[in-house]
Amino acid sequence: MKQTILSLSLLAFISTQSMWYDKPIVEPITIDTLLNAVMAVESNFDTMAYNSKENAAGVLQIRPIMVREVNRLLGEDKYTLKDRWSKAKSIEMFNVIRSHLKGASDEEIARTWNGGYNGHKKQNTLKYWQKVKQYTQNNIKQ
């Protein structure tokens, strides 16, 4: 217990000192309302979820094409298929996609996540959006 408190204190100290470096030492993972709802709909928060029909893995049910798209947007091969099993790396990939949808609404982001580049325009992503929206309304206090 004492070691855990010390470790957390050290982590807090290091994260406050990150202004001394080009990049923060500790980058917190923020799980917002939309991301929480998408994880619920995609996998019911199961990091080991796997859909063999679509080869979709992890908490955000990431398919290989999404890993390639994230790497393309970043201009480097930062993520691998193995990273789909990591909750933290899956969230990072989600946020890369979201950051490239400048000015997009939660609906557009969710539908693009589900249906790909033009997902926000596809009729078949409306049902997905309704599930995300319903989860948000029923489970997340705003």
Image: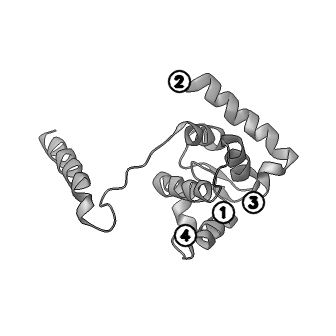
Q: Which mark is first along the chain, 1 or 4?
A: 1
Q: Are marks 1 and 3 in contact (CB under 8 Å)?
A: no
Crowdedness of circle 4 by 10 Å Cα count: few (<14), some, many (20+)? few
Which percent across, then down, holds residue 78? Answer: 51, 72
Label 3, label 2: how far apart the Cα atoms are: 30 Å
Identify the mark nearer the N-term, 3 or 4: 4
Which residue is tagged 2? 141
Q: Position of residue 4 (x, y in %)?
A: 19, 43
Q: Amino acid at mark 2?
A: Lys
Location of mark 3 (residue): 117
- Residue plotted at (78% across, 52% down): 119
Q: Considering only order in the chain, which callout, 3 or 1, is on the residue closer to the N terminus?
A: 1
Q: Nearer the viewer, mark 1 or mark 3?
A: 3
Q: How many marks?
A: 4
CB under 8 Å between discs 4 and 1: no
Vertical order, 5 against 14 (above or below): above
Q: CA distance from mark 3 to mark 4?
A: 20 Å
Mark linked to residue 80: 4
Q: Height in image: 26 above or below 34?
A: below
- Identified by mark 4, the residue type is Thr
Q: Residues under labels 1 and 3: Cα distance?
A: 10 Å
Circle 1 sits on which residue? 66
Hey, which residue is sitting farthest front in the picture? 103
Q: Position of residue 97 (x, y in %)?
A: 62, 58
